[in-house]
Amino acid sequence: MSSLFDAARSSGDTISALVDDLAAKAPPTHRDALRNDGAIAAHWQTFFSKASEALPKRDSATLESSITSRFAELDATLRRRIDDNGVTYNLYSDAVSQPRPWSLDLLPSIISEREWALIEAGAVQRARLLNDVLADVYGEQTLIKDGSLPLALVQGHPGYVRPAHGIRPRGNTFLHIVAFDLACGPDGRWWIVSQRTQAPSGLGYLLENRMIVSRLFPEAFRALKIERVVGAYKALIASLLAHSKSGSDARIVLLTPGPYNETYFEHVYLARYLGITLVEGGDLVVRDEKVWLKTLKGLEPVDVILRRLDDDFLDPLELRADSALGIPGLMQAYRAGNVVLANAPGSSFLESTAVLAFLPKICEKLYGEKLLMPSIALHVAATRQVRC
């Protein structure tokens, strides 16, 4: 057996020339993730070399067609596994909500260890900043009083939950999961395009994506020593248990809006993988400011709710009155500190693009440091300080 790059060398072709036949170079204003200074990046050399080890020995005339055929077969296998595993998403715009097959690229996005360290540091800093902003907005509101965050941008946003003001969750943790949409500039610098804080999805799809692609390229994943993702899920469960009064004995449930939600597959998949109970609003009830799960044996206590239900629908008594998806009295149980909500209600105003413009100065004010990962360029037309 010979690898793609061994065969390329033996036929007199350079690695760059061979890959250029298969993938065009990016425009000058775009980043070429495949190449470094015109040459194929080392990690991609390893990936293609290992991915082609199963190919029989070919001469230079048939090498490219053999590789093309090989990756076409792998792509067909990927589509078949998505179909067999039932990986789907729904669209609310569909006349009849029919599940659609999940979209997944065959080739993974490979990020070097050094580059990932920069992304990780920036994401951790941003998550910490957003959590502290929430703690202030639903507490002392110092950032609003000193003009660092416009009042209209917070309380004028439909995502601001007034019944949540003054509630201090256990550990002062409002955000247990945060999602960021990232983009890479032509200079290789990563930017945050948007942030998801209310009920961010993606954990289930991330896991399924990794499992499918890693099984298609097992040798490449081993050779590149790709960082495993299982530790993140263990850390999430450990953190949720640590924030509960019941500690390691806490019962965690995943609250879903139901099968018509666009990411319902992920809700089922994630609950099964994490070993927690998947519930809808009707499966839970509040008694004596505590949340209980209805079972055949009677009511059983619920300590943590990992929710995929938007804020408005959580509690028809204090939020949206016409919600048939929530649990009456849930906000009072949360206020009493008897249940952990991940994430805490009231964070969706942070998803507003306008908020991104104020985060650099807030970061310097709170931490005395600059944002490690900047947001996309924004310009605020005018702001007016309002005394509270």
Image (cartoon, helix red, strand yellow):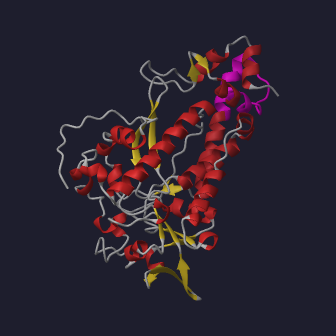
| Residue 261 visible from this viewpoint | yes
Q: Residue 337: x, y in percent?
A: 45, 72
Instruction: Pick the residue in front: 25 or 123.
Output: 123
Q: Residue at coordinates 33% horizontally, 38% vertically from top-left? A: 361
Q: Residue at coordinates 72% horizontally, 27% vertically from top-left? A: 49
Instruction: Pick the residue in front: 159 or 85.
Output: 159
Start-end of magenta stretch:
48-70
Q: In the rendered view of the protein, which quadrant contains the C terminus?
A: bottom left
Instruction: Pick the residue in front: 226 or 164.
Output: 164
Q: Quadrant of residue 57?
A: top right
Kindly report the secondary structure that dominates the magenta region of the rendered protein.
Answer: helix
| Residue 325 visible from this viewpoint | no
| In this rendering, position of residue 102 left or right of residue 370 | right
Residue at the right extreme, as displayed: 1
* Vertical placement of residue 267 versus 361, above or below: below
* Vertical placement of residue 340 versus 160, above or below: below
Q: In the rendered view of the protein, which quadrant contains the N terminus?
A: top right
Q: Quadrant of residue 360?
A: top left
Q: How many marks?
A: 0
Q: Is residue 59 magenta?
A: yes
Q: Residue 354: x, y in percent?
A: 28, 43
Q: Residue 185: x, y in percent?
A: 44, 27
